[in-house]
């Protein structure tokens, strides 16, 4: 019986080879060495941060997030939003022309279209059409709400007379690094792991010709593109390197589902993938969309022309909250421009970190749209996880509170105090354990800050001082409600003193612009007229600090410190409009400050292209919203609405609002278009939050995030 079975299998294998030869389709050749050569592979690199869509289930059981861009799936996060595990997942297609050995990929050889399939759910479809019109690949994404699996429904339409192979190309980058992964084939599954993170890829129709290799040296795509024979060496495993998994999809012209599951170990990842595949794409999608529909139903209504973007922005913010560290909301599911020189080690935080300032912006948006529970969780996280023993907050942190960068920004110490007051969190425990230590810290260390809100310069910053004053006023009120009149008096006195002196500290009367009297971006000392040389970050040069302006002084109005009709604010805005405002086809916005170096070069090279942090700052979408809030405070509702229209216009086809917007009519690259997002970060949570706040404020006719106790 054993011999007969062996002969039978051998006969089947020989028949398979004969069939392959007759069809003219190159088949895989079993490698003589089970371990792939070429270790550890070429350097790893994260993908551009210009995402067209993000998604996750609105459940706590499913701890996986996906991102999409340029026709492919990019970073996947698991089990928390600060751990990336995938560089890219896409398909490759064999050529149609006889004798052509070059494979085509979705990312390089197709035109891309993204569709929002449900305006009340994070459901998206990518349609990739070959540039020669020979094939189309349509992919619809969902997440299994019950487990950590991404499901992709795939339709491959080929116009080629010959058989076209469809290959899945998966580059796992587990545990926040592209190196140190191991990959292997187990039956019909592709498995990969790095320490306590693992992935499993299975396809409903099955796979064949599976191989595991090292990126750029022995991976399947590199093999088939570099060998004239078109033969694929199948390697059973690749260990401790930048691994890539590659396999041919069986019967690809029939619709199929790909499941990518994650777990703490390979068995768990495979169990999740198989269970989700057994559930089926349709059922998983129905459950997934139901969860989002139920959430959107709870949101406030705004002006109809803004409602679609409003709902999407709310879901995007919800998708940036972690499901283990509740209340922790990262800045963006991305790494700006793909990070530094490589992503070999798990030392790149990108924007998947928590900034107290960004979290305040997001929490105020949740409060404005009617989701107070999310806002409360954000404050809980700030106080219980991020806050340090001395009352301060880190510049930014991983989800568990470990600081990432090491500076101090006093607005980030102040904003949680404003948020506590706005949310009515004035109980004794909040006061004694959190508000009082933070307020005492501000009084001791302020108003001068080691870094202002753009995280680059020290000194007296109008935006930082606005937050400090508002934070101290709110802390004083919380102190009074807890019977501590002494502390209340100290905070109120400091706030009043700083409010009286903020102009003397931060507004020059001898500047080169306008009538010489306007707010600076930041003054190194308490004399804004001394012409202190300021060396700007990102290789932007050294300037007299009176030459550098930003619109951060508008925080003095938003937080209630200054009247919206303050004459110095108006004069300073005239300078802003002359120096850092740009009209685009989608609307006007502003640079962070003049001579900013944080952005792409004019020729499209990314920021830090030379490893020396060189670049040129572009427009920031959210600054249009900040100007809109100022105009609303002045009663200029139509002007404020135009700012909101601009913010909406900056969103891409997936309704994702970017951090930066390309500011030139000339497009040096296809992905850099006038008035559209750049490779810095899309979506940016702060930008989405600003859209929500301005839309809600317009509906109410006032700025809901202006603390009444400060403006009184």
Image (tube, rainbow, N blue to C red):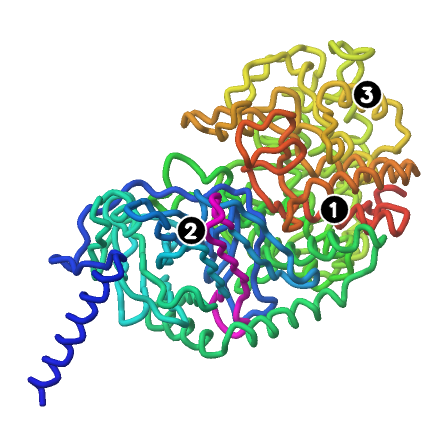
SS at badge 1: helix
Of residues 706 and 120, the one nearer the viewer is 120
Q: What is the C-alpha distance between the residues marked 1 and 2? A: 30 Å
Q: Quadrant of the C terminus?
A: top right
Q: What is the C-alpha distance between the residues marked 3 and 1? A: 24 Å
SS at badge 2: strand
* Any part of residue 400 in sight: no
Residue 228, given in percent of the width and then of the height, sits at 22, 44
Q: Which residue is mark 3?
A: 574
**CA neighbours of label 2 inside 10 A, class few (<14), some (14 to 19), many (20+):** many
Question: In the picture, residue 618 is in which quadrant?
Answer: top right
164 on left or right of 140: left
Q: Main secondary structure of the magenta part?
A: strand
446 on left or right of 482: left
Q: Quadrant of the N terminus?
A: bottom left
**CA neighbours of label 3 inside 10 A, class few (<14), some (14 to 19), many (20+):** some
Q: Which residue is mark 2?
A: 88
For marks 3 and 1, the one nearer the N-term is: 3
Of residues 252 and 556, the one nearer the viewer is 252
Q: What is the C-alpha distance between the residues marked 2 and 3? A: 46 Å
For marks 1 and 2, the one nearer the N-term is: 2
Q: Is residue 138 magenta?
A: yes
Q: Which residues are magenta?
A: 129-151
Residue at 53% in and 24% down? 601
* Front: mark 2 or 3: 2
Q: Which residue is mark 1?
A: 691
């Amino acid at each position: 019986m054993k011999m007969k079975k062996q002969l039978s299998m051998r006969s089947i294998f020989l028949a398979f080879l004969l069939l392959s030869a007759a069809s003219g389709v190159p088949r895989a050749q079993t490698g003589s060495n089970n371990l792939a050569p070429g270790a550890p592979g070429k350097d790893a690199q994260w993908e551009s941060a210009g995402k067209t869509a993000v998604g996750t289930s609105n459940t706590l059981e499913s701890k996986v997030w996906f991102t999409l861009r340029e026709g492919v799936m990019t970073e996947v996060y698991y089990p928390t939003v600060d751990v990336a595990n995938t560089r890219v997942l896409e398909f490759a297609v064999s050529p149609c022309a006889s004798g052509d050995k070059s494979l085509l990929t979705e990312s390089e050889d197709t035109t891309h279209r993204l569709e929002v399939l449900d305006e009340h759910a994070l459901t998206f479809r990518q349609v990739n059409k070959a540039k020669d019109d020979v094939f189309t690949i349509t992919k619809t994404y969902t997440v299994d709400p019950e487990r950590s699996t991404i499901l992709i429904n795939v339709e491959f339409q080929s116009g080629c007379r010959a058989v076209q192979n469809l290959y899945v190309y998966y580059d796992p980058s587990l545990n926040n690094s592209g190196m140190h992964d191991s990959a292997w084939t187990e039956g019909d599954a592709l498995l990969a792991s790095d320490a306590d993170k693992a992935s499993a890829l299975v396809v409903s129709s099955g796979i064949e010709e599976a191989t595991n290799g090292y990126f750029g040296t022995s991976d399947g795509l590199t093999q088939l593109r570099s060998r004239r024979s078109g033969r694929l060496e199948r390697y059973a495993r690749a260990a401790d390197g930048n691994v890539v998994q590659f396999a041919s999809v069986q019967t690809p012209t029939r619709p199929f589902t790909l499941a990518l599951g994650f777990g703490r170990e390979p068995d768990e990842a495979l169990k999740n993938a198989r269970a989700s595949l057994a559930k089926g794409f349709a059922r998983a999608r129905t459950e997934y969309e139901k969860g989002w529909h139920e959430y959107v139903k709870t949101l406030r209504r705004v002006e109809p022309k803004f409602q679609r973007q409003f709902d999407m922005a709310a879901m995007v913010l919800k998708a940036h909250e972690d499901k283990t560290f509740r209340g922790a909301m990262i800045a963006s599911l991305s790494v700006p421009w793909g990070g530094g020189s490589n992503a070999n080690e798990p030392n790149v935080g990108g924007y998947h970190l928590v900034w107290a300032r960004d979290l305040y912006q997001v929490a105020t948006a949740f409060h404005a749209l009617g989701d107070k529970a999310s806002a409360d969780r954000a404050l809980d996280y700030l106080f219980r996880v991020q806050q340090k023993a001395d009352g301060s907050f880190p510049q930014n942190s991983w989800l568990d509170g470990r600081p990432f960068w090491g500076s101090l920004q006093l607005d980030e110490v102040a904003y949680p105090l404003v948020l506590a007051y706005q949310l009515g969190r004035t109980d004794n425990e909040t006061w004694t354990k959190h508000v009082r230590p933070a307020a005492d810290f501000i009084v001791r260390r302020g108003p001068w800050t080691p870094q202002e809100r753009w995280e680059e310069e020290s000194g007296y910053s109008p935006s930082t001082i606005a937050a400090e004053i508002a934070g101290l006023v709110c802390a004083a009120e919380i102190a009074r409600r807890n019977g501590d009149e002494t502390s209340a008096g100290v905070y109120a006195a400091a706030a009043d003193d700083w409010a009286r002196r903020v102009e003397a500290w931060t507004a020059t009367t001898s500047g080169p612009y306008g009538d010489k009297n306007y707010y600076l971006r930041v003054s190194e000392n308490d004399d804004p007229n001394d012409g202190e040389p300021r060396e700007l970050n990102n290789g932007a040069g050294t300037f007299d600090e009176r030459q550098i302006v930003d619109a951060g002084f508008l925080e003095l109005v938003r937080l209630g410190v200054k009247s919206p009709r303050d004459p110095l604010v108006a004069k300073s805005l005239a300078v802003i409009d002359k120096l850092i405002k740009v009209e685009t086809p989608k609307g006007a916005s502003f640079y962070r400050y003049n001579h900013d170096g944080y952005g792409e070069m004019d020729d499209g090279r990314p920021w830090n292209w030379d490893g020396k942090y060189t670049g040129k700052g572009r427009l920031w979408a959210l600054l249009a919203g900040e100007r809109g809030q100022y105009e609303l405070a002045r009663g200029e509702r139509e002007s404020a609405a135009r700012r909101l229209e601009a913010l909406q216009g900056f969103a891409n086809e997936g309704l994702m609002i970017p951090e930066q917007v390309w500011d030139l009519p000339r497009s040096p690259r296809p992905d850099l278009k006038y008035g559209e997002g750049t490779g810095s970060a899309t979506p940016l949570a702060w930008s989405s939050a600003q859209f929500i706040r301005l839309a809600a404020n317009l509906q109410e006719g006032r700025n809901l995030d202006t603390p009444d106790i400060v403006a009184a």
